[in-house]
Each structure stands twice: as C-alpha cells, then as structure tokens.
Image (cartoon, helix red, strand yellow):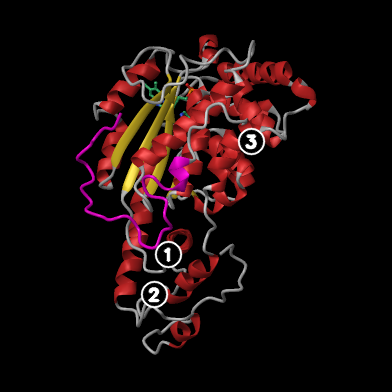
C-alpha cells in the first residue's frame, strides 16, 4: 500500500548510468519462483546484484576537489557521494529521489510483554503510516520523499494482501517463527515490493514495524554474531531494566531451542534457516528488499537494528550487497552497533533514536542528498565529464590537492 502517492515532489529523475534493472529487467523477472529449489530461488535474487563500479567511485573522489573545498572535506558524507558514483556508474551524481519503505509483521514473542506497546499496536501504526499520519510520513515529506508500506505478516487482516505471507509469527521460545518455505516466500515478497516501489537508481530507505521485533532481532544477532544475549537485549520501544533481563532470558531460550537443528550446532551456514527459526515476516521481507534494491542500482539506506539484521543476512547471502549500504543512524539497541561493526558500516547520525518505521533512514536522506547537491554543483563547473584522474589533479582551477586514491579508505 503506497502512501503519500503524489509526494514525489522533488522532481528528481532516477540516477544516470545504471544497468538495465528497470521494470521487467532481469532482477524483477528473477523474483517469485515458488516450487524451485531454495538455492535456485535465492540465487536468482543474489545473481541479480550487479558489481559495484570501484573505478568510477575513485574518479568521483578525484574530481570532487574544487576551488571551493578539498575532496573529502564533507567527511563521511563525501564517502557516501563516492559510493553513489560507484553504484550509478557515473561521477556526475545529483540528489536522489527518496522512497521510504516500511514492511510490517507481528511477533508471537510479544505475548511475553517484551514491548512498551501491546501486540495489536503494530496494525494501528500500520494504518497510521498508510494514512500519512505517522512520524515517518512527516520525515519523508521533509526530503521530498514518499512512504510505501506493506503488510507481510500482521496478525490481523489489514486489507493489504499483496505481499502477505503469514498472520504473525509463532513464539520463538517455543517453536520456529515460521516454516522455512514461508521465510523464502517472505524474502521474495520483499524483493517484489522493492521492484514495485523503488525507482531505478533511487535512494531506498528501509524501515520496519513489528511490536516485539527487537527481541527477535536480538536473537538473530546473537546467532549471527555468536554474541551473548545479555549483551544484545535492549530497551526496544522503551521497556524497563527488568523487562530487558526478561528479553535476554527469552532470547537464550530461543537459541537453546534451535541449537543443533539440522546437525549444524548454530545454523551458521544457513541464514534463511535462522530467519525461519528466530525471525519475522518483515525481517525476511527486508532481506529480499535489500537484495532487490541493490539489483536496481539503489543506494540502500538502512534504518535501525532490525534493518541491520536483515542487511547482515543479505550480505551473508551476497557479499557485494555491502557496497550499496548506508547506515542512517545507530539506535539505542546494543545489537545495532554490533551489527553495523560486523558490516563495517559507520552511522551517519547518532541520536539515540528508537522509533523504527524507517524514521532514521528518512532523516539521513536529508544530509545525503545535501552532499549530492554540493557534488552536482561542483560537477557543473568541472572541466569535462571525461576528466581523467590525471587531468582532474592537474586542473588549474583547483586550489587543493586530491587525496591519494591508494589511501586507506575502502573506495
Ligand atoms: C505505536 C508504535 C510506536 C513505535 N515506535 C517505535 N516502534 C518500534 O518499536 C517496535 C520494536 O520495539 P519492541 O521490541 O520494544 O516492541 C517496532 O515496531 C518499531 O518500529 C513502534 C511501534 C509501535 C506499534
Ligand atoms: O533500532 C531501531 O530501529 C529500534 C529500536 C527500538 C525500537 N524500535 C526500533
């Protein structure tokens, strides 16, 4: 269900130079092969992710220096600008159209009282997002973006059946969250949604809602990182210390319940099995959504802890997805920082937020597009689009030196 439909007020076009992943492209055709073996279904999603263009990213870094400022002087934002160049395969970047996606799912573990919200609140929040009344709608509007939401696994009937895979997960302390086949279906549903809502080469800001999902995310993070649940359980939507301890105990139970299944003591080789055992429909959906957004040549801006869990699983399935990711912020969930560290992502913002629903990603779209506007302005006065690293360095207009491209940064 798309909200703020008319709200692509930015007038931007999608980025230039992206490969053919528009509607009907290989990535989209690859989605939804129910009946095919799991490896084939996942392979179709991961194979669609194109290679990051490191050479163009380096070129963007070299031509960023102008008479007005040294390359890199906008710090980590500059790095994101070079990243966008590598994704779009052009150093002539400009602000990107923003779409904030919010995938929704309910969690059986919420019945233990692990959230500041009652389980039925997820559906209410979903309705508010669809009606344009939720905080994320205001944040998206500030950056000329629109919000697109989908019900992947709410307990109740929201009237949105397009991507629905289940009616809430089972309580992960007692049973797998969902059957393995549903985890695959939800991953593919998220990918289909991405193909529907993200224009090629846009900024894909990823969010989620699901009361109780910080507990599921802590369980997945503990399994993926091999970390102690007591170090990962956090205050979530705002619970007290006693409930944080309850969350840690529930995560331990869920991990004990699932240890040793299928002969693999920690399922470390099979992230989709982990998602089915411990995850949620929206967490699965965001794995597919992130893979498909990367396949569409989007800059994938993650929101909080739950989207970081999905991103880490997407990276384990397809390591080159990492090149498309930006961490918008680091939230108050202890697992979030650990997940970002594992992926080598530095957050744009550190505001102690814990709002979810794509709010951090929508907020960070502002500074990212501000950087791209500065870069666009500089490119307009740069010598020639064919500027080679050498000619850029020799540009007489530039009063500053370009950084050493063989320097320590990733690009
Ligand atoms: C009305 C409402 C407001 C929210 N503000 C943040 N979340 C957030 O809190 C949930 C995760 O925290 P926990 O594990 O403690 O439940 C997610 O739904 C997230 O989006 C909300 C969810 C709802 C329903
Ligand atoms: O990390 C997040 O996005 C988060 C944290 C707490 C509650 N809701 C979301």
User: Measured from the top left, where is residue 394 in percent x and y?
Assistant: 45, 88
Around disc 2, counting alpha carbons within 10 Å, would you say few (fewer than 14), some (14 to 19), or many (20 or more)?
Answer: some
Q: Quadrant of ligand 1?
A: top left
78 and 200: which one is in front? 200
List the residue tagged with mark 2: 69
Foreground label between 3 and 2? 3
Q: Is label 1 in a helix, a strand or a loop?
A: loop
Residue under the image location 76 percent in, 23 percent down: 262
Q: Is label 2 in a helix, a strand or a loop?
A: loop
Q: Is label 3 in a helix, a strand or a loop?
A: helix
List the residue tagged with mark 3: 39
Position above or below: 393 against 191: below
List the residue tagged with mark 1: 74
Where's the N terminus, which quadrant?
A: top left
Position above or below: 204 against 273: below
User: Measured from the top left, where is residue 28 in percent x and y?
Assistant: 43, 42
Q: Label 3 vs label 2: CA separation?
A: 49 Å
Query: Does residue 75 show up magenta in the picture?
Result: no
Residue 315: mark in rendering = none
Magenta span: predominant SS is loop
Bounds of the magenta segment: 1-29
144 and 270: which one is in front? 270
Query: Does residue 24 show up magenta in the picture?
Result: yes
Q: Do tag 1 and tag 2 residues touch (Cβ < 8 Å)?
A: yes
Q: Quadrant of residue 342?
A: top right
Residue under the image location 60 percent in, 45 percent down: 318
Q: Label 1 vs label 2: CA separation?
A: 9 Å
User: Measured from the top left, where is residue 200 in percent x and y?
Assistant: 37, 51
């Amino acid at each position: 269900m798309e909200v703020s439909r008319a709200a692509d007020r930015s007038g931007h076009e999608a980025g230039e130079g992206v490969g053919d992943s528009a509607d009907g492209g290989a990535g989209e055709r690859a989605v939804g092969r129910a009946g095919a073996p799991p490896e084939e279904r996942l392979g179709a999603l991961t194979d669609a992710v194109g290679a990051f263009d490191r050479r163009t990213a380096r070129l963007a870094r070299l031509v960023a220096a102008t008479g007005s400022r040294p390359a890199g002087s906008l710090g980590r934002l500059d790095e994101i600008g070079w990243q966008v160049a590598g994704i779009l395969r052009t150093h002539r970047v400009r602000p990107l159209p923003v779409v904030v996606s919010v995938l929704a799912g309910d969690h059986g573990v919420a019945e233990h009282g692990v959230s500041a919200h009652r389980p039925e609140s997820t559906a209410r929040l979903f309705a508010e997002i669809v009606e344009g009344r939720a905080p994320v709608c205001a944040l998206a509007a500030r950056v000329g973006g629109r919000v697109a939401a989908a019900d992947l696994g709410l307990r109740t009937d929201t009237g949105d059946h397009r991507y629905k895979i289940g009616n809430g997960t089972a309580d992960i302390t007692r049973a797998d969250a969902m059957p393995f086949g549903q985890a695959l279906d939800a991953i593919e549903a998220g990918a289909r949604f991405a193909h529907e809502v993200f224009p090629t080469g846009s900024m894909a800001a990823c969010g989620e809602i699901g009361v109780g999902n910080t507990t599921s995310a802590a369980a997945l993070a503990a399994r993926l990182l091999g970390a102690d649940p007591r170090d990962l359980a956090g205050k979530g939507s705002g619970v007290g210390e006693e409930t944080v301890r309850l969350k840690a105990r529930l995560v331990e139970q869920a991990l004990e319940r699932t240890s040793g299944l299928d002969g693999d003591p920690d399922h470390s080789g099979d992230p989709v099995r982990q998602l089915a055992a411990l995850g949620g429909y929206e967490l699965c959906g965001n794995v597919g959504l992130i893979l498909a957004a990367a396949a569409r040549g989007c800059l994938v801006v993650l929101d909080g802890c739950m989207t970081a869990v999905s991103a880490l699983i997407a990276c384990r399935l397809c390591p080159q997805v990492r090149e498309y990711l930006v961490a918008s912020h680091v939230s108050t969930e202890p697992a979030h920082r650990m997940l970002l560290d594992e992926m080598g992502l530095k957050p744009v913002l550190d505001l102690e937020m814990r709002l979810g629903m794509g709010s951090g990603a929508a907020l960070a779209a502002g500074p990212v597009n501000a950087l791209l506007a500065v870069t666009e302005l500089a490119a307009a006065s740069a010598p020639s689009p064919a500027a080679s690293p050498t000619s850029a360095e020799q540009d007489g207009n530039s009063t500053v030196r370009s950084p050493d491209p063989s320097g320590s940064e990733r690009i």
